[in-house]
């Protein structure tokens, strides 16, 4: 199972590091990252492999949401299937 | 990897435009619970519902978390209780109590199927059930009821229309202390569908499998936001934009249905691709029509824009999903739609226009508050009118109107939550009693002779 983590918010130092270290903590393997900065808005999309996750998916999702609150970012962790089904025939 | 623009679009649809899965509804057949001893039958009903649906809520919440999309309601529909209770030969209120108890035990917010199908006449159990509806809805919290009084194949049972006019009033009278909420849990249908996942009209038809999962999607806010990006598009382009949006919404419904079906070990029934509004800001069907170009919903042009919307939603959705069913179209419940509430309050949206709208969209006169002194025969005549539209157009129509006992035009009923609030809308005062009291059956139209 793979998930997509999106991070949107004001650009600050160390966002990528914080999100990826959280992934490491849950044993989620980062496969691909794209990021862009539009004016001062940071937008990162991360594809992660969850097949060796050491906790249930829901806990990772909650931890990411919590990290988002602490860092004043909007972080969403969603199964990749929702994007595949919506945008691919 | 998936295109970044697509990912952000999906997130925006969910976060900002109120995209959600409106309901996962588990249909459960109660045919194997029939027993001439009502207490035994009720015990079987309770046991079957709590066994089949024991994981429904937790599975729904798991999918919600995994996909990151809210699933607002988890619900249950059952075999029309008139069929299950026929052998008991007594008032079936105990079944409603058992259903309510089971719904609370498994944690679903509504359970539908306290129903009777009397489009061609009353069989054993039907009359007892219909007469017990006011009490059943008053003494339970989560039970919903529906009665089918007509169909294209059979015509309209005018005796049933008359009876239901009285029952709707009684439901409101018995629940005056709860803002007449009883009547909001009762739907009178023509051409009722057997796999509808939406309440209050959901029931599990006798031709359905023992247990199945149906999904109702939503997303009026997404459609409105998509249209807002093209202020100068011509109407053909508008239809295309709606189709594309509907496709995306329905795909998510299909995914949720498949996941739920797999995890619950229950066959996947259908996706009902309806645009179901809520009173929340940005979740209104009326606002889509206004985005297309009406100053306010209910004015001239409303029927045409709604017809286009309803058709485009179906065309987009039908390719997105392997099995479509239920009501599938745009819903126009007045009290549950912020734009409709405003339009009704300002007087632009009146009941006659709503009636016209029901000829081109998926349901009927839905969640409309009428004056408290409305006579039962007038309600019966409204039911007959609406059933006639359904019968002639070979479509489902329904009446869910709430007589606001003790209130008149200018006042309102407020239930809060998904049911919203509705202003009392004026009705014609000239009587239709003579017509209603003639009784009998309105014959099926020529459209019924298709064989």
Image: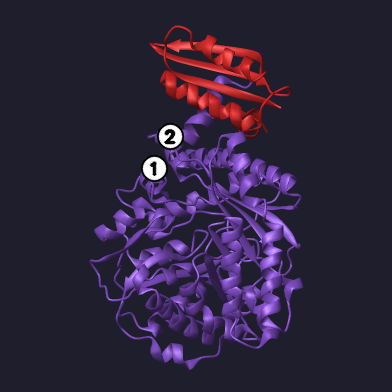
* Residue at 33 percent of width and 48 percent of height: B294
Mark 1 crowd level (few <14, some 14–19, many ≥20, 10 Å Cα): many
Q: Colour of chain A?
A: red
- Which residue in the rendered view is the most extreme toward the left? B410
- Give me the chain letter of mark 2: B
- The reply to whether dot 1 and dot 2 touch (C-beta < 8 Å) is yes
Of the 4 image quadrants, the one containing the N terminus of chain B is top right
- Which residue in the rendered view is the most extreme toward the top? A13
Q: Nearer the viewer, residue B168 or B237?
A: B168
* Residue at 71 percent of width and 83 percent of height: B37
Question: Above or below — where is B333 with respect to B309?
Answer: below
User: Separation of disc 1 and disc 2 at Cα?
Assistant: 8 Å
The reply to whether residue B325 is visible in this rendering is yes
Of the 4 image quadrants, the one containing the C terminus of chain B is bottom right
Render colour scheme: by chain
Question: Above or below — where is B86 with respect to B33?
Answer: below
Residue A71 sits in quarter: top left
Q: Nearer the viewer, residue B269 or B27?
A: B27
The reply to whether residue B299 is visible in this rendering is no
Q: Which residue is mark 2?
A: B16
Instruction: Find residue B381 and report its horizontal and vertical position in percent.
Output: 43, 80
In the shown orientation, is residue B281 left or right of residue B139?
Answer: left
Q: Which residue is mark 1?
A: B282
Q: Colour of chain B?
A: purple
């Amino acid at each position: 199972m793979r998930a997509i983590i999106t991070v949107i918010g004001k650009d600050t130092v160390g966002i990528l590091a914080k999100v990826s270290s959280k992934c490491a903590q849950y044993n989620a393997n980062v496969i691909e990252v794209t990021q862009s900065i539009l004016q001062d808005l940071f937008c990162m999309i991360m594809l992660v492999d969850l097949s060796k996750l050491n906790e249930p998916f829901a806990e990772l999702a909650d931890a990411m949401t919590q990290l988002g609150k602490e860092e004043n970012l909007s972080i969403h962790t969603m199964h990749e299937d929702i994007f595949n089904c919506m945008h691919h025939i | 990897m998936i295109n970044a623009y697509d990912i952000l679009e999906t997130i925006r649809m969910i976060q900002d435009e109120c995209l959600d899965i409106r309901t996962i509804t588990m249909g459960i057949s109660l045919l194997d619970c029939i027993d001439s001893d009502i207490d035994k039958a009720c015990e079987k009903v309770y046991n079957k519902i709590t066994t089949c649906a024991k994981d429904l809520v937790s599975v729904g919440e798991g999918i919600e978390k995994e996909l990151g999309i809210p699933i607002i309601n988890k619900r249950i529909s059952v075999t029309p209780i008139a069929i299950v209770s026929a052998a008991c030969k007594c008032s079936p209120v105990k079944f409603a109590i058992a259903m309510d108890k089971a719904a609370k035990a498994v944690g679903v917010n509504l359970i539908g199927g306290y129903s009777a199908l009397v489009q061609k006449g009353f069989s054993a159990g039907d009359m007892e059930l219909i007469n017990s509806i006011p009490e059943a809805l008053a003494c339970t919290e989560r039970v919903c009821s529906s009665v089918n009084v007509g169909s294209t194949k059979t015509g309209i049972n005018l005796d049933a229309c008359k009876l239901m006019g009285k029952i709707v009033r009684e439901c409101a009278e018995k629940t005056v202390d709860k803002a007449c909420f009883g009547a909001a849990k009762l739907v009178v249908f023509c051409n009722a569908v057997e796999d509808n996942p939406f309440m209050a009209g959901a029931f599990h038809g006798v031709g359905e499998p023992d247990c199945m999962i149906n999904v109702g999607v939503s997303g009026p806010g997404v459609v409105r936001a998509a249209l807002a990006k093209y202020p100068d598009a011509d109407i053909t382009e508008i239809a295309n934009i709606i189709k594309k949006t509907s496709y995306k919404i329905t795909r998510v419904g299909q995914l949720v249905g498949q996941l739920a079906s797999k995890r619950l070990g229950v066959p996947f029934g259908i996706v009902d691709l309806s645009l179901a509004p809520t009173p929340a800001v940005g979740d209104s069907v009326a606002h889509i029509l206004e985005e297309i170009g009406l100053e306010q919903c209910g004015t001239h042009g409303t029927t045409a824009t709604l017809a286009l919307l309803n058709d485009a939603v179906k065309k987009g959705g039908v390719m997105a999903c392997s099995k479509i069913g239920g009501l599938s179209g745009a819903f126009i419940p007045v009290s549950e739609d912020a734009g409709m509430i405003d339009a009704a309050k300002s007087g632009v949206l009146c009941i006659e226009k709503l009636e016209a709208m029901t000829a081109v969209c998926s349901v009927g006169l839905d969640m409309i508050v009428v004056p408290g002194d409305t006579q039962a025969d007038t309600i019966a005549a409204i039911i007959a009118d609406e059933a006639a539209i359904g019968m002639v157009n070979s479509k489902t129509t329904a009446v869910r109107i709430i007589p606001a006992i003790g209130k008149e035009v200018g006042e309102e009923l407020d239930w809060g939550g998904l049911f919203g609030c509705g202003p009392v809308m004026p009705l014609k005062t000239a009587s239709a009693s003579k017509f209603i009291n003639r009784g009998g059956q309105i014959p099926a139209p020529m459209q019924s002779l298709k064989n």
